[in-house]
């Protein structure tokens, strides 16, 4: 019974003794560690610089120089290397490198670097690529040092013709020391990139950006950017990309080569943009609005990344919808296109639109056009069918002289940037055919059938067909070989509209139902807003003479015929635009 009472007491005493022993042992060990850390902290480490430089140079296969080595106790004990350079002149330089060692592994005889933090420096592309390739293999770990994580703060990447930075990043390594994942960011993480190694020194890359502008491309800020692809030795293959900048969105795939200069080729699966944004980027001041979409091949070649924006080329299909274009300052209204489609080949100084198709004012345009940006010259060869002419003319002026459905074929050239000089900046020649329309503000039938009429002001002339040739140049608008046909009369002639919208011309009209006896020569004058048509002086004189000799009716008609014949026989022809060439030259520069 006494033994049973003494046993618990003995056990308690031994347990209390053991706990006191553990406390003393722990305090002693902690004191030893603190003394060791203090000894390391107080001991100068500069003597170890050559040895550390030699070791790192052998493992990284590049010369390494270090200005100073210190020991820091906070936040965790670590080594601080000051003034570190890896490589020659164009190498990697850092103000400081913090090396955080794993103490438990160090006590076990293994050198394990828990974290390396590189701060405030520059890295040239070639030595950085070699360093990444080195860490992508387990070679560093097999030489006795294992690195678990490498962090970058305030570093700048130097490439030919361009410096990126400051950059922050993190490289994570697997248990065997091989690079497992690399993450980089710029501009407060507005742009991020993730790299994962593949075989053959390639990397899977995922890039994301939002509200970010790349250096040297500040005029093209990225509202959003997503890129996925594979980075090789001197190239990057984008399996897919999606970019939105200034309302312009691009999506597709492509490849960039940068080992010797920069070369880019991209397949645009879809591109959408407001036309006004595109014109602003091209530096064109033409007032143009609408929605633009495209697909095709985009390429560029330059010595540096910053020069790429000036060397882009495009070859593909383009569609524009709901287009409004004011190509001249004097236009009353912009031209409105429901849709425009074309095959486009675009170079920095040249733009070609082939297989051009456009819908406007109930009709269609087809043909081809080109823009020479160096000479600021637009050329086109266009055919039109079924266009409501009154809507087209309303864009030019309030005074609509013609209405009807128009077919036409024309060639023109126009100097861009001279919209305030229209039509002096334009050369246009072609033919036209109007159907089922009217000549407004004049009544040709009244003048042709009543020689006593002094002039026709007001009224309309309805026609079934109106055909002719036209030309537009710095002297105005010129119409030749004009033929008018309707149920009541036929007429032929010519007319001009001067720069001040003054009218001049001649017509000869035959009233149907008179056996071709009545043929009235007429003079066109006045202005576009107030046109006048009157019988010619010789026609009136002939009518008076014929009436006097043969009486009214037949005598009047015969006199008009004779007067018209005399006009043709003896009249002066000083018209410089009597013949209209089919192919205009470029308008003269002023």
Image (cartoon, grey):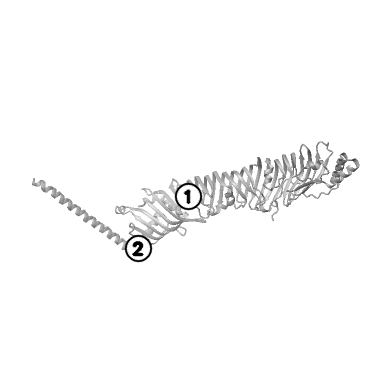
Check the picture and name the quadrant holding the N terminus.
top left
Q: Element under label 2?
A: helix
Is 95 or 327 nearer to us in this picture? Answer: 327
Q: Mark 1 points at which residue?
A: 209
Is 48 or 380 nearer to us in this picture? Answer: 380
Spot occupied by residue 338 in the image (x, y as percentages of width and height): 62, 42
Marked residue nearer the N-terminal end (1 or 2): 2
- Work out which residue is located at the far left of the displayed protein and give it: 1
Compared to 94, does 461 lie above or below? Answer: above
Spot occupied by residue 243 in the image (x, y as percentages of width and height): 51, 47
Compared to 57, does 359 lie above or below? Answer: above
Q: Element under label 1?
A: strand
Check the picture and name the quadrant holding the C terminus.
bottom right
Q: Report the side of 186 relative to 478 (left or right).
A: left
Question: Could you tell me how many numbered marks the image carries?
Answer: 2
Q: Quadrant of residue 58?
A: bottom left
Picture disc at residue 272: none
Alpha-carbon neighbours of circle 2 within 10 Å: few (<14), some, or many (≥20)?
Answer: few
Compared to 88, does 344 lie above or below? Answer: above
Q: Mark yes or no: residue 552 visible.
A: yes
Alpha-carbon neighbours of circle 1 within 10 Å: few (<14), some, or many (≥20)?
Answer: many
Spot occupied by residue 164 in the image (x, y as percentages of width and height): 48, 55
Q: Kindly identify the residue that appears in the image at 47 percent across and 58 percent down.
A: 90
Q: Name the residue under label 2.
A: 47
Q: Report the side of 314 relative to 2 (left or right).
A: right
Q: Mark yes or no: residue 304 visible.
A: no
Spot occupied by residue 292 in the image (x, y as percentages of width and height): 58, 45
Do the CB atoms of the residues marked 1 and 2 lie less than 8 Å apart?
Answer: no
3D distance between C-alphas at marks 1 and 2: 46 Å
């Amino acid at each position: 019974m006494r033994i049973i009472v003494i046993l618990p007491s003995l056990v308690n005493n031994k347990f209390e003794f053991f706990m006191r022993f553990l406390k003393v042992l722990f305090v002693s060990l902690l004191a030893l560690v603190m003394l060791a850390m203090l000894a390391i902290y107080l001991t100068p480490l500069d003597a170890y610089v050559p040895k550390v430089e030699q070791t790192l140079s052998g493992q990284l296969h590049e010369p390494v120089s270090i200005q100073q080595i210190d020991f820091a106790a906070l936040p965790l004990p670590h080594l601080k290397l000051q003034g570190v350079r890896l490589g020659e002149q164009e190498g990697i330089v850092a103000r400081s490198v913090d090396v955080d060692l794993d103490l438990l592994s160090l006590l076990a005889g293994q050198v394990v670097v828990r974290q390396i933090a590189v701060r405030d420096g520059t890295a040239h592309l070639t030595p950085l690529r070699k360093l990444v390739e080195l860490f992508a293999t387990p070679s560093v770990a097999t030489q006795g040092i294992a690195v678990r994580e490498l962090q970058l703060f305030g570093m700048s990447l130097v490439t030919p013709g361009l410096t990126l930075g400051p950059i922050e990043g993190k490289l994570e390594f697997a248990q065997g020391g091989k690079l497992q994942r690399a993450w980089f960011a710029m501009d407060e993480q507005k742009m991020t990139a993730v790299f994962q190694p593949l075989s053959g020194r390639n990397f899977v890359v995922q890039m994301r950006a939002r509200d970010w502008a790349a250096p040297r491309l500040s005029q093209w800020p990225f509202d959003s950017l997503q890129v996925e692809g594979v980075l090789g030795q001197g190239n990057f293959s984008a399996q897919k990309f999606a970019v939105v900048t200034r309302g312009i969105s691009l999506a597709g795939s492509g490849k960039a080569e940068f080992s010797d200069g920069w070369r880019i080729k991209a397949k645009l699966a879809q591109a959408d943009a407001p036309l006004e944004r595109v014109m602003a980027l091209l530096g064109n001041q033409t007032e143009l609005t609408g929605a633009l979409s495209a697909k095709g091949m985009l390429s560029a070649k330059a010595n540096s990344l910053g020069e790429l924006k000036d060397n882009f080329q495009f070859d593909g299909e383009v569609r524009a919808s709901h287009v409004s274009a004011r190509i001249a300052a004097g236009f009353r209204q912009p031209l409105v296109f429901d849709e425009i489609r074309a095959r486009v080949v675009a170079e920095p100084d040249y733009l070609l639109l082939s297989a051009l198709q456009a819908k406007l004012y109930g009709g269609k345009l087809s043909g081809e056009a080109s823009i020479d940006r160096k000479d600021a010259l637009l050329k086109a060869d266009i055919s039109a069918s079924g266009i409501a002419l009154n809507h087209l003319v309303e864009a030019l002026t309030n005074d609509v002289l013609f209405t009807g459905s128009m077919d036409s074929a024309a060639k023109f050239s126009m100097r861009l940037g001279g919209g305030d000089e229209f039509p002096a900046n334009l050369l246009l020649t072609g033919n036209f055919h109007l159907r089922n329309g009217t000549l407004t503000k004049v009544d040709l039938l009244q003048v042709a059938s009543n020689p006593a009429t002094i002039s026709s002001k007001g009224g309309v002339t309805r026609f079934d067909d109106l055909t002719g040739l036209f030309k537009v140049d710095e002297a105005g608008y010129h119409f030749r070989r004009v033929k008018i046909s309707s149920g009541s009369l036929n007429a032929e002639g010519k007319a001009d509209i001067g720069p001040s919208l003054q009218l001049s011309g001649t017509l000869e009209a035959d009233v149907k139902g008179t056996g071709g006896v009545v043929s009235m020569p007429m003079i066109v004058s006045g202005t576009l807003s107030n046109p006048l048509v009157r019988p010619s002086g010789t026609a009136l004189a002939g009518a008076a003479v014929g009436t006097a000799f043969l009486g009214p009716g037949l005598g009047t008609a015969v006199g008009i015929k004779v007067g018209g014949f005399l006009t043709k026989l003896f009249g002066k022809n000083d018209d410089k635009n009597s013949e209209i060439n089919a192919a205009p030259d470029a308008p003269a520069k002023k």
